[in-house]
Image: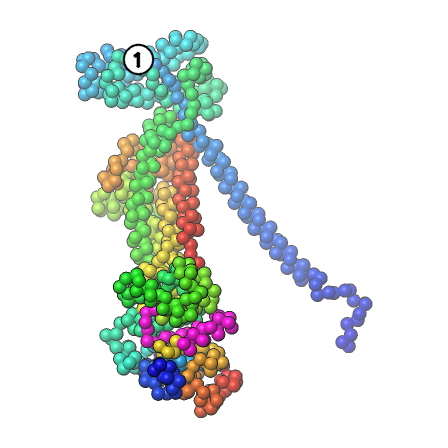
Amino acid sequence: MNDMRLIDRKTTMNEIKIAAEGVDVFYGESHALKDVSVDIEERTVTAFIGPSGCGKSTFLRCLNRMNDTIPTARVTGRITLDGEDIYAPSVDPVQLRAKVGMVFQKPNPFPKSIYDNVAYGPRIHGLSRNKAELDEIVENSLRRAALWDEAKDRLAEPGTGLSGGQQQRLCIARAVATAPEVLLMDEPCSALDPIATAQVEELIDELRQNFSVVIVTHSMQQAARVSQKTAFFHLGHLVEYDDTDTIFQNPRDTRTESYITGRIG
Amino acid sequence: MTDMTAGAAPVRGTLVADAHTRKRNASEKRFRLYGAIAVSLAVIALVFLLTSIVRNGAGAFMQTYISLDVTLDAAKLDKSGNRNPVEMAKVTTFGYAPLIKDAMASTIAANGIEIEGLDKPEDLISKEASAQMRDVVLANPELVGETRRFEFVADGRIDGYYKGRVTMQSAERDSNVTPAQLRFADALKEAGLLETRFNWNFITWPDASENRPEVSGLGVAILGSFYMMLIVLGLALPIGVAASIYLEEFAPRNRLTDLIEVNISNLAAVPSIVFGILGLAIFINFVGLPQSAPIVGGLVLTLMTLPTIIITTRASLTAVPPSIREAALGVGASKMQTVFHHVLPLAGPGIMTGTIIGLAQALGETAPLLLIGMVAFVREYPSAPPEGFFEPATALPVQVFNWTQRADPAFIERASGAIIVLLVFLFIMNAIAVVLRRRFERRW
């Protein structure tokens, strides 16, 4: 009951989950992200929009330190998760990524069974003590990803045999299975057809009950549909960050307005 | 102005080929023709090669045998008469030769064979026969004094007569065989004492000396090659795969790794004989490993195979889509978990294929083995591994090289037969590679 009321309430009341202050990212010589400061709230869907190459995906990948895997990438500034600096030397990126899950642009299930896809995260993080617990985690995750009804009779079949939309939901289930607190989604619907997109969007709205969701999207309609907060990036700068309604109806910056009305990007 | 003079100009529909399109189509046709010609040339060359090898070599798998009743004369074989194998061993193979001569004479008499001008009928039988008989007698001393039927390998010329290599005409000019002996062989065949049948001994027996091609076989060579392949597989696969994984997944990209990469590619192009010199200098002269031993051959071939395995392994690791790595890292797998749980299984079929192709290359390699002494004449089988790795052996391609250098034309047949055996092994290995690739190939 409490949960229900929380959602009905205005999102600005939420606590801050991730705080970024003055984040700069360099890929070798190129300065990809310039002085970005954003506060991402708990139980909120935050959308990052902007033209291609504006740095929104780069910033998203800073939040779970996926940029660490690119040898030339260098991140400066401060990003905290629940007040803890995630770039502190003592932080293990592997632990961080279990807490900050990620869903990618192209559905990328492992070429294993549906069950193994979802069970992989819990297995490597030791989240279950026995088979029964693992089964439960898998079922819950698939339910949360709205895939259980379609997949429950074919858990042993390869995840790559599912349709594109189902594969993406499987990837969401896989991300959810490690019990993350934040879910990062990098254009999760760009490879999906409209029906699958609608299903995933609906799912994102449900996920908001438990997670803080950050979604990068090319589609402004999608941002308007699913998010409560929107950040507009342009040429590596964070131009504007506000409630989604404000951004779309009453933008302060002219660049935001130009982008939303289709004049740039 | 805009009116396109209807009627006067020829009809030019957009679907009718114009000069430009016709030219384009003609060049495409020409290109297909070139391709077809190239493929047919390759196929013809292959068919020609295979038929010539099979025609020359098929004979090596057949062998003529002569059955004789030999009386194992106690007076000649066991002078002391106490059937003591140690004392009987003093009688050399020379001591057994007269027995065969006697047996031949009695066979001629028994079957009523009369051949004009027949001289030395015992020459029909391989010179190896006395040794063969001696081995049997020493193993079973109680046979002495009995008459026993032995099946002897026929001499190479007689064998060649039944394979079409030796004819009556060629025998006239040949100092090793006479037409009378050939007629005698025909008479023995009629009497049912001579037959040509499949020759397992070609696969199992060791090499034999210059003048007895009929008893030479590939046993030691196959064993030597097999031991070397074991060593290559045991060393090159783990070292190669570990090196590739490190270079591809873990190593930082800098000057040093660039240098290593360039050098691995260069090593793959180094002529194999250079590896032979290296093996001679390091493994034999410096480390002091025995000559002609599979261990040295295996080490040299390992060095030669490593670049192949590293290059193919890296190629199959790169072929694993980065999305799989991201997916694994995204759920919080460590770098090593990502590699071993996801990347390596997907690259597995490619690695296996590369390894088998590398092994097949190593199996057919001759030049480096010549330099480390594997070209030696070896009649003793190496014992079981690991001791066998350090005992002299030869290898299949070296055996081919060896036999082609010998004078007796029977060895040409044997060499072609050895090539067939080598090709069969290579074919089997490549077939395994294809099956593994098909079987474990996974799509993503």
Examine the rendered structure and indicate whether residue B262 appears above or below residue B370. below
Taking B14 as reference, is A143 left or right? left
Quarter of the image where one finds residue A69: bottom left
Examine the rendered structure and indicate whether residue B382 appears above or below residue A34. above
Q: Was residue A234 drawn as part of the magenta stretch in this picture?
A: no
Q: How is the image coloured?
A: rainbow
For mark 1, name the chain.
Answer: B
- Figure disc tally: 1
**Label 1 sits on residue:** B147
The residue at 78%/64% (across/down) is B10
Give the residue type that dot 1 points to: Thr
Q: Is residue A245 visible?
A: yes
Quarter of the image where one finds residue B155: top left
* The C terminus of chain B - image quarter: bottom left
Examine the rendered structure and indicate whether residue B182 appears above or below residue A1. above
The residue at 31%/38% (across/down) is B224
* The N terminus of chain B - image quarter: bottom right
Q: Nearer the viewer, residue A165 or B173?
A: A165
- Given the current orientation, which residue lies at the most extreme right position? B7
Taking A29 as reference, is B137 left or right? left
- How crowded pointer 1 is (Cα within 10 Å; few <14, some 14-19, many 20+) is rated as some
Q: Is residue A125 visible?
A: no
The residue at 53%/41% (across/down) is B44
Label 1 element class: strand
Measured from the top left, where is residue B88 in percent x and y?
21, 18
Measured from the top left, where is residue B327 in percent x and y?
37, 67
Measured from the top left, where is residue A12 in percent x and y?
37, 87
Q: Was residue A204 drawn as part of the magenta stretch in this picture?
A: yes
The residue at 37%/22% (across/down) is B153
Residue span colored magenta: A177-206
Quarter of the image where one finds residue B156: top left
- Given the current orientation, which residue lies at the most extreme front position? A1
